[in-house]
Image (cartoon, grey):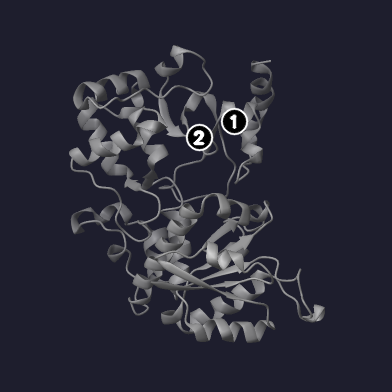
């Protein structure tokens, strides 16, 4: 069982909420920041969860010595650079719904935290949160055992003859130059498991199959029948992911050509003829009726995760990314309904595509 510490100024209940047969969290109340740093490090935990607002319920604690979760996390990360064999994942927990925007992955502060979780969501989806934290504990345990020598080839679960897939300078040099497990974790989150590109999740898998999200399990079974196993490297016990090149090769063997060059209705029919497991075509989120199944569904909308075609989607603005990372796009339906502004991760539309927004908003009125 992994050992966790939950640091909060009041809510002891979350230490119990986040504990199960795999991870046991103990509650740690507020102390002066350097004393709290010592308490946490001396406990040698496998994972630490920090409340963001450690400065609200002081109960006699001097107001002049208050701090938020970020400064404490920075002290813990600094200690890990000096002693990487003692490094552990740090989860930021908050009741503030905008906390993910504050600690956006493209901002420096995100480097402190492996995950940002909302307290309300923890109560609603505890199992999902626990799965994420267990994957972090397992990954860090593996990384701590590497003695400071991090080799990407040992982390991705690929056979030796397929390692050229991950032979990208941005990945290899970043991982091998890392000085502590939390830096490797950040690289994986930003460049590999956290982004569609070399790896894809079930939503992207279904989009390439041209089928509905509800067909994820039978798509997975079809891949397994074809000898394609899901990703088994670092962080693989979290959400299921697939190597994109293996999925694409499998679909070429089924369709005789690149999958996304065929309408989703054709792909679903061919899959059903071969596997007889109930494949249903994905439909455009924009075109109503049966005609929506005749679109070239190619990727999952970054907002709603439904299969989407290029011609009815807009590009998301983001800083330059390595060439192996897939560009995020939003379906017109999420733009027309403003869903892209209100989800867990709000998106900004690329300036070159913004001129289309008024036309999309007016199209169904």
Which corner quadrant of the image does residue 245 belong to? Answer: top left
Circle 2: element type = loop
- Give x and y (percent) for residue 362: 69, 18
Q: Residue at x 36, y 27 (%)?
A: 210
Name the residue nearer the viewer: 241 or 44: 44
The C terminus sits in image quarter: top right
Residue hosting label 2:
301
Image check: 54 left or right of 93? right
Q: Disc number at residue 334?
A: 1
Image check: 280 left or right of 103? left
The N terminus sits in image quarter: bottom left
Name the residue nearer the viewer: 123 or 189: 123
Q: Is residue 119 above or below residue 250?
A: below
Residue 264 visible in the picture: yes
User: Do labels 1 and 2 touch, CB within 8 Å?
Assistant: yes
Badge 1 density bin: few <14, some 14–19, many ≥20, Cα 10 Å: some
- Give x and y (percent) for residue 171: 39, 60
Name the residue nearer the viewer: 320 or 3: 3
Which corner quadrant of the image does residue 264 belong to? Answer: top left
Q: Is residue 276 above or below residue 174?
A: above
């Amino acid at each position: 069982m992994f050992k966790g510490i939950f640091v909060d100024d009041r809510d002891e209940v979350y230490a119990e909420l986040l504990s199960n047969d795999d991870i046991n969290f103990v509650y740690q109340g507020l102390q002066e920041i350097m004393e709290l740093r010592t308490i946490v490090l001396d406990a040698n935990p496998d994972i630490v969860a920090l409340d963001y607002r450690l400065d609200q319920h002081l109960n006699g604690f001097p107001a002049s010595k208050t701090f938020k979760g970020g400064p404490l996390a920075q002290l813990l990360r600094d200690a890990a650079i000096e002693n990487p064999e003692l490094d552990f994942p740090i989860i930021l927990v908050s009741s503030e719904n905008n906390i993910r925007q504050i600690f956006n992955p493209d901002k420096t502060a995100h480097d402190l935290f492996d995950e940002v979780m909302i307290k309300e969501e923890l109560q609603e989806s505890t199992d999902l949160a626990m799965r994420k934290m267990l994957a972090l504990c397992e990954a860090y345990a593996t990384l701590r055992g590497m003695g400071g020598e991090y080799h990407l080839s040992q982390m991705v679960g690929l056979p030796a003859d397929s390692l050229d897939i991950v032979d990208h300078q941005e990945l290899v040099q970043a991982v091998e130059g890392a000085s502590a497990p939390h830096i490797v974790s950040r690289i994986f989150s930003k460049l590999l498991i956290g982004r569609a590109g070399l790896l894809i999740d079930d939503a992207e898998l279904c989009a390439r199959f041209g089928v509905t999200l509800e067909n994820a399990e039978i798509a997975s079974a079809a891949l397994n029948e074809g000898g394609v196993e899901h990703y088994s490297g670092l962080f693989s016990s979290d959400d299921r992911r697939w190597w994109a090149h293996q999925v694409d090769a499998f679909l070429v063997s089924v369709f005789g050509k690149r999958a996304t060059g065929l309408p989703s209705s054709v792909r679903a029919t061919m899959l059903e003829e071969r596997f007889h497991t109930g494949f249903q075509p994905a439909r455009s989120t924009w075109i109503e009726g049966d005609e929506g199944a005749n679109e070239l569904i190619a990727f999952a909308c970054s907002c709603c995760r439904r299969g989407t075609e290029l011609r009815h989607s807009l590009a998301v603005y983001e800083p330059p990314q390595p060439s192996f990372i897939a560009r995020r796009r939003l379906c017109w339906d999420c733009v027309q309904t403003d869903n892209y502004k209100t989800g867990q991760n709000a998106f900004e539309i690329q300036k070159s595509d913004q001129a289309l927004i008024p036309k999309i908003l007016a199209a169904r009125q």
